Amino acid sequence: IARDCPIAVLTRSAAGCVIVQGSEVHAAPAYPVSKVVDVTGAGDLFAAGFLYGYTSGKPLAKCAQLGAVAAAEIISHMGARPEINLRSHAQALELL
């Protein structure tokens, strides 16, 4: 992967994600949810949170947390649109 792509992120549902950057491999946990209702949009929201952190210069662990929090919010209800302000939620969790 490192030859063709400087970074890769593999999501693993409840098992969190794996981030591969060069020769380094990092595993990060999923954000806990009380009940999974609908997984539509989970990958998109994870990517949005992760990429927001990445393009903002956050450490990879923080990027993974941002992605996990966004994905957790979206799977806790029906539909692929967040029901809360994700920025405010991330700030409350001290991720931003």
Image (cartoon, rainbow, N blue to C red):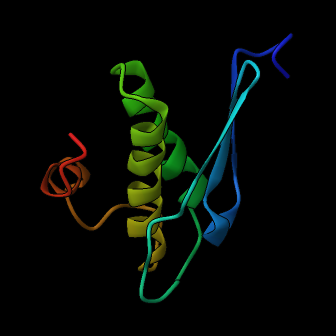
Q: Residue at x 59, y 71 (%)?
A: 39
The front one of 85 and 32 is 32
Outermost residue to the front: 24
From the viewer's perspective, is residue 41 above or below residue 23?
below
Q: Residue at x 38, y 47 (%)?
A: 66
- Which quarter of the rendering shows the N terminus? top right
Residue located 42% across and 50% down the image: 65
Image check: 12 left or right of 3?
A: left
Relative to 50, is 85 on the left or the right? left
Determine whether, in the image, residue 4 is placed left or right of residue 46: right
Q: Is residue 94 above or below residue 74?
A: above
Q: Position of residue 49 (x, y in %)?
A: 42, 42
Position of residue 83 measured from the top left corner of the image (x, y, whole percent): 27, 68
How many numbered marks appear? 0
In depth, the one of 67 and 24 nearer the eye is 24
Res 4 quadrant in image? top right
Residue sitting at 38 percent across and 67 percent down? Answer: 73
Q: Position of residue 40 (x, y in %)?
A: 58, 67
